[in-house]
Image (spheres, rainbow, N blue to C red):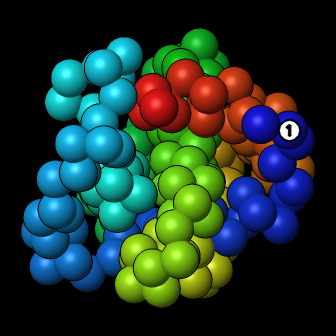
C-alpha cells in the first residue's frame, strides 16, 4: 500500500462532515455477470467498484457522527493522565480507521471509469476545515485536562498506521 503522505491524511480527515450524500449510498449496483463471478471469491463480498466504495463510506459514517459529537460536546474530564491517554489513544485509533476507509474507498474507485463512483469516493476528502477543527478541539481538551497533545505526533502516527489498517480493512478481491 505504501506510505500515506501527510497531505492525503489531512484530506482524508475531511470526511468529518461530508460522508457523501446518503442517497447515493442507497444505489444498488447490478449483480456481476456470471463470467465476472469468481468461484474463489468470498460470498457476500461485492465485486462492483461502486458497491466496494459504498462499503467503505458506510464504515465511515459512524466515525463521522462520533467526531461531530466530539466537536459539539464539552471536553471530557479525566482524573488521571492514564485516563486521558486511553481516551486520546482511542480517538487517534478512530482517526486512523477513518483515514484508512477514505483512502481505501479511493483505491476502489480508481478501478472504474464511472465518474459518479469516483466523485462519491472523493466527497469525504473535501472538507479540510472540519479536520482542522478536530485537531483544535483535541488540543483544547488536552489543555483543559492539563495534558499534552502534539498534532504533528498525531499526524505521524496516522501516517505510520494507515497503510497497515488499510490492508486490514480492504475487501478481498
Q: Which picture quadrant has residue 10?
A: bottom right
Asked if residue 72 can be seen in this view, the reply is: yes
Task: Give the vertical position of 44 relative to 61 (above or below).
Answer: above
The residue pinned by badge 1 equals: 2
Task: Give the vertical position of 41 relative to 120 (above or below).
Answer: above
Q: Which picture quadrant has residue 107?
A: bottom right
Residue 97's spot in the image, x, y percent? 52, 38
Q: Residue at x 69, y 37 (%)?
A: 162
Residue 11's spot in the image, x, y percent? 68, 70
Q: Residue at x 21, y 42 (%)?
A: 34
Q: Which of 92 and 52 is in front in this view?
A: 52
Q: Residue at x 19, y 63 (%)?
A: 29
Q: Which picture quadrant has residue 21?
A: bottom left
Residue 133's spot in the image, x, y percent? 58, 73
The reply, left or right, for residue 148 in relation to residue 60 is: right
Asked if residue 127 can be seen in this view, the reply is: no
Q: Which of 35 and 15 is in front in this view?
A: 35
Q: In which quarter of the image is the N terminus?
A: top right
The reply, left or right, for residue 98 in relation to residue 146 is: left
Q: Which of 156 and 82 is in front in this view?
A: 156
Residue 77's spot in the image, x, y percent? 43, 37
Amino acid at each position: 500500500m505504501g506510505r500515506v503522505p501527510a497531505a492525503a491524511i489531512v484530506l482524508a480527515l475531511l470526511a468529518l462532515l461530508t460522508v457523501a450524500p446518503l442517497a447515493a449510498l442507497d444505489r444498488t449496483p447490478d449483480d456481476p455477470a456470471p463470467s465476472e463471478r469468481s468461484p474463489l471469491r468470498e460470498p457476500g463480498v461485492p465485486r462492483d467498484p461502486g458497491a466496494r466504495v459504498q462499503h467503505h463510506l458506510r464504515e465511515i459514517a459512524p466515525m463521522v457522527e462520533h467526531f461531530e459529537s466530539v466537536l459539539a460536546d464539552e471536553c471530557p474530564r479525566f482524573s488521571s493522565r492514564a485516563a486521558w491517554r486511553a481516551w486520546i489513544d482511542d480517538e487517534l485509533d478512530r482517526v486512523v480507521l477513518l483515514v484508512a476507509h477514505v483512502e481505501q474507498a479511493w483505491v476502489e474507485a480508481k478501478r472504474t471509469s464511472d465518474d459518479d463512483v469516483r466523485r462519491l469516493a472523493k466527497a469525504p476528502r473535501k472538507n479540510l476545515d472540519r479536520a482542522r477543527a478536530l485537531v483544535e478541539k483535541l488540543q483544547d481538551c488536552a489543555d483543559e485536562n492539563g495534558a499534552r497533545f502534539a498534532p504533528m505526533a498525531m499526524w505521524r502516527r496516522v501516517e505510520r498506521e494507515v497503510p497497515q489498517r488499510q490492508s486490514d480493512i480492504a475487501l478481498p478481491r
